[in-house]
Amino acid sequence: MAERAQRETGTGTADQELVRALTAAVRGEVSGTPADRALMTMDASNYRRVPRAVVAPRDTADVAAALRVCREHGVPVVPRGGGTSIAGQATGTGVVLDFTRHMRRIESLDPEARTAVVQPGVICDELRTAAGAHGLTFGPDPSTHSRCTIGGMIGNNSCGSHSVAWGTTADNVSALDVLTYGGERVRAGQGLDGVPGALAEGMRALVDGDLALLRTGYPELPRRISGYALDALLPENGVDLARALTGSEGTLGVLTGATVKLVEAPAARALAVLGYPDESAAAEAAHTLLPYGPLTVEGMASDLVPDAGGLPKGGAWLFVETGGGSAAEARARAEEMCRAAAADGVTDHMVVSDPAGQRVLWRVREDASGTATRMPDGSEAWPGWEDCAVPPERLGGYLRDFRALLSQHGLRGTPYGHFGDGCIHVRIDFDLLTGPGIRRFREFSHDLGDLVVAHGGSLSGEHGDGQARAELLPKMYGPELTGLFGRFKDMWDPAGGLNPGMLVRPHRMDDNLRFAVLPKQPVDVEFGYPHDKGDFSAAVRRCVGVAKCRNTSVSGAGVMCPSFRATGEERHSTRGRARLLHEMLAGEVVTDGWRSAEVHDALDLCLSCKGCRSDCPVGVDMATYKAEFLHHHYAGRLRPAAHYAMGRLPLWLRAASVARLAPVLNAAAGVGPLAAVAKRAGGIAAERTIPEIAPEPFTRWFARRFRARTTGPRPRIIPQAKAATLWPDTFTTYLAPSVGQAAVRVLEAAGKEVVLPAAPGKAVCCGLTYVSTGQLDQARKVMRRTLDHIGPALGRPMVVLEPSCAATLRTDLPELLSDDPRAAELARSVRTLAQYLEEYAPDWQPPRIDRPVAGQTHCHQHAVLGDAAERRLRERAGLTGELSGGCCGLAGNFGFERGHYDVSVACAEEQLLPAVRDADPAAEIVADGFSCRTQLAQLGERPGRHLAEVLAERL
């Protein structure tokens, strides 16, 4: 019992006492469980520290109570927002205060004063949206604006792409409400009136005693983020305490509220994309555009954008955004930028006025913090020197010296970032797994620190110093000024209880590296992980914490991560699950390995939608990791009933077909008590209706029809060029044969003769249901048998109607059977119906339907297959409008499993159901996935059809 209590509440007696004391004092959630502690071990940096407990305060009183308990127990405190910090300052060994759960209200917004009062957990985009209703915005917008918090931005003094126009967070803060570790309340604004007497006197003495040093010790540049901004306390700077505290990384006080400034948002924007021969030319030109008043001047080179098909010709580009009172005015200013750039070696340019086109281009830039974590050859790259900044006019020279220093140390990186502010982001291929690699990381960091200072720059230009660079602050500021930083810290936090090891008396930059705890040898796994050289640890390391999966807005969210948006809990985000897998491999906090209940519970609500495979900037593939985990978790053990009932669905459906039991089973499913017993036995949610089995499977219908057309006195021989091979997936065959029949009619109308890939009686199956439930040994058997059965059809284009089956054949098949070349050959041959028609019947004209369309693009199609061909086919058929994104929430077996119904419905209500509900009454409701159509049939008011059925009806 004692061991179980430790497991549930903490790691030992002291931690249990701490958790009990916090629980008694705080109204918000308090946890010392391995799972919740594991979720907070890392941010988006290279660092990892294990907290003793996590508190989600409900209000300022909760924060004060938590601080009191921590003081009494001598435990440090780390305030945390979205956890997207890149220097390690959002990790700690004491108590983490998670502000994202409750303290996320916009208290007030004054359009006339252009200010807003917010709690620290407010998401940046939530504030921007609220301000946008009044024609205003919050100026700072880091690339993580859809999930980072205002509190975190204030802690780091974040900036973003619009800082050339609207400045840093410090430029946009009016007042801060702060609690010190000692429990004092401080209202920080201009002047020291809101500061307790002793603290105010101490600050006055500090400033008055070193006026000359404070006036001369700071470099002049727009992105000077490093260290404490003590110069803001100078009389000529208005004794701006709010500005001085901004960027202090939670080391001086805990933010409980902020009054921030808002700026006028331009009514229209345009984007000038300027091409240059190389990165240096773009960097040299960036500052020359500033006099024209751009909103952004962002830069990136071709090594970050290997496919530059949509960009002007060149080896590097500047993205220059302009604003105006009208679209014409914004475009005119963008064209003025292009003319101005013509004198500075621009090779080509384009102006994009269309908002959708601008979003596409900006997504390339905003995803760079993730995509830059992989070098062109697939090797890993890491932060550490993510955001140093130099005076903009010196950027070109700095980048040349930076590239030379990389070469000198045998390192590679892909710089990009805020060229107009002289701030460079870069991920570098440090080897942080071995002793020699870590020594090189340290030596390079010291040399680069010297280089940045030599160019008059700041070690940090956006993300703060944290553990990554604080050790180097004496290089930038000298011993006297860094000594003042120490005095300032001790004045505010004499007990050293707030975020120790950051900024003042910092940890070494090569301590607490998050990779040190991972296994030194590859883990024995089932999938091939081809993009990670077969190493499961490397696959898990892909998650660098940029947290795009924590996007709470449907708009622009793609598919990832529907379960997080349904629950709002970190453990149900892709990042949260990756963190738990990391800790499972580490074995320190999560100690049960593959048997871990913590990891199982987090993965339980993963829909295996594969959205992260495409939407995550670093390509985390949680659906695969889940299948891998379930395989090991249940090895040699009894599985949940749903795994047998739905995981082996192809087996049961085939057996029912052979025995001609469909009418009997359908009748039984319509009898309430019998259906209830069946659902209970099969682990199926009571709220679900069991789908009907087709009386005649598609394969039987096809065989009957084929015999009638090919037998007789002169049997027909189908030429290879005219044959279209149609994959008879389980769902089409046994549950929706009308889809297969419609596809046959469409393919025949396109001049093709349809054949199946295997002889009658030889069932084929992609193995999807076995994979999604982690029955990987069985999945391999099914896949190998399928490869044996298709024989001569191998290598022919294979039309697969069910998107989830097509995605399984395209990805899971070759990754599970990496030793069988036939698997890769079949994967290459997979086509959707639209892809096949476009490639092999390009002259075929589909019937004109001329109606609006609504429905949903299947999540697996979005993630693996793409839907460009489907869009073009719908357009040619006169089906106008867009299908919604996201996930339907049924997701194969997920939505049918007991305990998943509420989340399944919440996912459907996010995009699919509203899109269909709001559709034109005349609209065609298109949903190619069987799950999507089933979810609509059970939850919606209008049924959906496969595109093949819609087309076939009009032939």
Image (cartoon, helix red, strand yellow):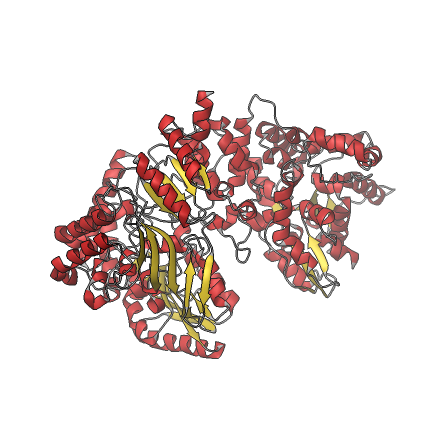
Give the left or right position of residue 264, taking residue 390 as reference. Answer: right
**Image vertical order of residue 774 relative to residue 160, above or below:** above
Q: Name the residue at 22% across, 51% down.
A: 405
- Kindly tell me whether residue 524 is visible in this rendering: no
Quarter of the image for residue 585 reads top left
In the image, 72 versus 165, the foreground residue is: 72
Give the left or right position of residue 360, taking residue 510 as reference. Answer: right
Q: Name the residue at 50% across, 42% down.
A: 621
In the image, 875 versus 246, the foreground residue is: 246
In the image, farthest residue toward the front:
197
- Kindly tell me whether residue 929 is visible in this rendering: yes
- Which percent across, then down, holds residue 902? 63, 43
Q: Name the residue at 42% across, 53% down.
A: 148
In the image, 696 versus 501, the foreground residue is: 501
- Which percent across, then down, holds residue 755? 73, 43
- Which percent across, then down, holds residue 363? 46, 58
Q: Name the residue at 38% across, 75% down.
A: 338
- Quadrant in which the C terminus is drawn: bottom right
- Which percent across, then down, holds residue 445? 23, 47
